[in-house]
Amino acid sequence: MKFDWRYNRDFFAGLLYILLGAVAMWIARDYPFGSALRMGPGYFPTVLGGMMIAFGVAVLLQGVKNNEKIQGNFSIRALFVLPIATVVFGVTMEHLGFIPALALLIPISAAAGRQFKWIEVGLLTAGIILLSLGIFIWGLGLPYIMIKGIWEY
């Protein structure tokens, strides 16, 4: 089987990871690095960029090995719905709080796909809200307003 890089799914995904990791490391090049115990502002983007490059190399090599072709088609609906969902999340987070912002973000984002089912999206929304509360609010202690005017943590 001949390797055809033009239509290889994993080849381009690996290149994208490598590019994003290199850009992150390039942006953080002038930031103080610090150490593992005293991380400077350049530590996280440099380490994460290096991990993305390593992951990208692994995915790229997997693509060369498997030579799997790109499948699927282009979605105009997703091209418009996903940026709208992001803007709605930002505006809602500012004016209503964390929980309403997530409660809108997930169903709007799910509407970008072809197989939207209200029960599945409702369960996913509830699960992600609980998981996000556990991680970001109670675990990391981030100072987000839960529901503006009602539940401010």
Image (cartoon, rainbow, N blue to C red):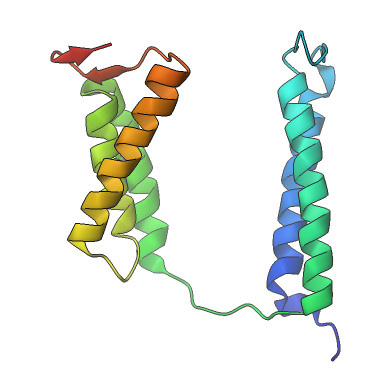
- Say whether residue 66 is left or right of residue 75: right
Name the outermost residue toward the bottom.
Answer: 1
- Where 9 sits versus 108, above or below? below
Q: Residue at x 36, y 56 (%)?
A: 80
Q: Residue at x 38, y 12 (%)?
A: 143
- Where 24 sits versus 79, above or below? above
Residue 10, percent across and down? 71, 67
Residue 114, percent across and down? 32, 71
Depth check: give the residue in front, 30 or 2: 2
- Say whether residue 64 is left or right of residue 103: right
The C terminus sits in image quarter: top left
Q: Residue at x 34, y 17 (%)?
A: 144
- Where 25 sits versus 64, above or below? above
Depth check: give the residue in front, 97 or 81: 97
Residue 83, percent across and down? 39, 47
Depth check: give the residue in front, 105 or 142: 142
- Where 22 sits versus 110, above or below? above
Residue 71, percent across and down? 57, 80
Q: Quadrant of residue 105?
A: top left
Name the outermost residue toward the left.
Answer: 150
- How many numbered discs? 0
The N terminus sits in image quarter: bottom right
Q: Residue at x 33, y 45 (%)?
A: 85
Q: Quadrant of residue 8?
A: bottom right
